[in-house]
């Protein structure tokens, strides 16, 4: 009897010890977990300004259960300053970039040359949940507050026309002062003996217009070429044509015309043809309008400075995706400290128009 009672006591003691060990171990794990949690809460990795970093949070890796459900596509947009065939190449580039990824969708929007239209379109895009916009502002200084407001809600980069004092992440496009100098070189070729020249553009205070005009004047300084003035048309093609016609009437000895936007030179060409002044009035263009390239080979336009709008569209969409989905910074995308990435321009002269037109058509077709 004593032996049996003794065994019961031993068993009870062993069970009590086991319970005590389990209890202590549980408390130890809780304390350890609590300590790790507190430690984790004190750590934060800074990679981007907070309002930009938060944009990419929904697209970071999730648990295996969550990853089984499809993630929403990131909405990106490209907003032009005005409507022109020039931007059809930019659209082709943007669509090409989008086709290379299954986690983004894009919309390509054309402006009408006014800041008001851009506000209407971009405000709507943001309400619809767009996370990134590449934009060519027609009035950078006047739109600074507008751009800053959008930059608090989405990733904003400027393309073709810059707003360096705004909160945009960076600029992607042409070095417009250098492009203006190239136009000046073409003008000096066309007018070796000098003469009066009128310059035309859509919006005079847009950054690309200001800078191209500056570069043009720098290039012809010290020559016999006289720049009369800069005529604007508010991105209205009909008014561009009338400006050219009025200039030919007012200045009968006019020697040259320079169009700083894509549609300006074709508008000048129509006016010069109607006046019967082909060969007498030399024309220098910007961009790769089909009519411009054909007229260059026909000897009706001396030459043009071409940009790479296809690359504008392609690189802008790729950059926005990298920033929003991959959380990359402009520095990681090899954007210079100046926050401006320039895409080279080139001059097209007689005999080169058809070949460049073929290249443009390949861009549009995606080949």
Image (cartoon, rainbow, N blue to C red):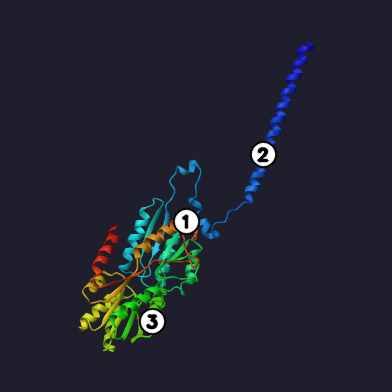
Q: Secondary structure at mark 1?
A: helix
Count of numbered circles on the image: 3
Q: Earlier in the sequence, mark 1 or mark 3?
A: 3
Tell me which numbered mark, 2 or 1, is placed earlier along the sequence: 2
Return the x and y of residue 266 as percentages of the image width and height. 27, 75
> Mark 2 = which residue?
30
* 94 horizontally vs 47: left or right: left
Taking the spot 33% from the left edge, 79% from the top edge, the residue there is 200
Of the two numbered discs 2 and 3 in the rendering, the one whose residue sits closer to the viewer: 3
Question: Looking at the rendered structure, which numbered label has been put on residue 217?
Answer: 3
Q: Residues within 10 Å of mark 3 (few under 14, many from 20)?
A: some
Q: Is residue 98 above or below residue 246?
A: above
* Left/right of residue 197 with respect to residue 326 in the rendered view: left
**Is any part of residue 239 visible from this angle?**
no
Residue 35 in sight here? yes
Give the labeled residue for mark 1.
324
Image-quadrant location for residue 351: bottom left
Q: Give the Cα distance between marks 1 and 3.
A: 40 Å
* Residue closer to the observer: 48 or 222: 222
Tell me the element at label 3. Answer: helix
Taking the image as shown, residue 167 lies to the left or right of residue 32, namely left
Please tell me which residue lies in front, 289 or 241: 289
């Amino acid at each position: 009897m004593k032996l049996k009672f003794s065994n019961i006591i031993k068993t009870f003691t062993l069970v009590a010890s086991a319970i005590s060990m389990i209890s202590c171990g549980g408390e130890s794990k809780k304390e350890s977990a609590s300590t790790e949690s507190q430690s984790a809460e004190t750590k934060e990795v800074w990679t981007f300004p907070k309002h930009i970093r938060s944009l990419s949070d929904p697209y970071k890796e999730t648990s295996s259960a969550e990853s089984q459900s499809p993630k929403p596509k990131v909405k990106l947009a490209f907003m032009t300053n005005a409507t022109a065939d020039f931007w059809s190449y930019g659209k082709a580039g943007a669509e090409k970039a989008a086709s290379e990824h299954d986690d983004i969708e894009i919309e390509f929007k054309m402006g009408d040359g006014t800041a008001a239209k851009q506000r209407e379109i971009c405000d709507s895009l943001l309400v619809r949940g767009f996370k990134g916009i590449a934009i060519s502002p027609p009035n950078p200084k006047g739109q600074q507050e507008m751009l800053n407001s959008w930059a608090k809600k989405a990733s904003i980069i400027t393309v073709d026309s810059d707003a360096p004092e705004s909160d945009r992440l960076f600029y992607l496009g042409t070095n417009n002062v250098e492009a203006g100098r190239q136009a000046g070189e073409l003008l000096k070729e066309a007018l070796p003996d000098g003469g009066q020249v009128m310059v035309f553009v859509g919006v005079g205070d847009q950054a690309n217009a200001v800078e191209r005009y500056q570069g043009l004047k720098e290039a012809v300084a010290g020559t016999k070429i006289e720049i009369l003035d800069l005529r604007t048309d508010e991105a209205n093609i009909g008014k561009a044509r009338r400006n050219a016609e009025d200039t030919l009437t007012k200045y009968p000895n006019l020697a040259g015309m320079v169009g700083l936007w894509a549609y300006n030179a074709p508008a000048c060409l129509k006016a010069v043809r109607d006046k019967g002044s082909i060969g007498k009035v030399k024309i220098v263009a910007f961009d790769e309008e089909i009519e411009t390239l054909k007229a260059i080979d026909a000897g009706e336009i001396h030459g043009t400075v071409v940009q790479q709008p296809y690359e504008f569209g392609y690189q802008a969409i790729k950059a926005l995706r990298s920033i929003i989905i991959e959380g990359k910074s402009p520095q990681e995308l090899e954007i210079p400290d100046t926050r401006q990435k320039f895409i080279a321009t080139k001059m097209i002269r007689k005999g080169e128009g058809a070949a460049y037109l073929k290249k443009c058509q390949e861009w549009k077709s995606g080949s």
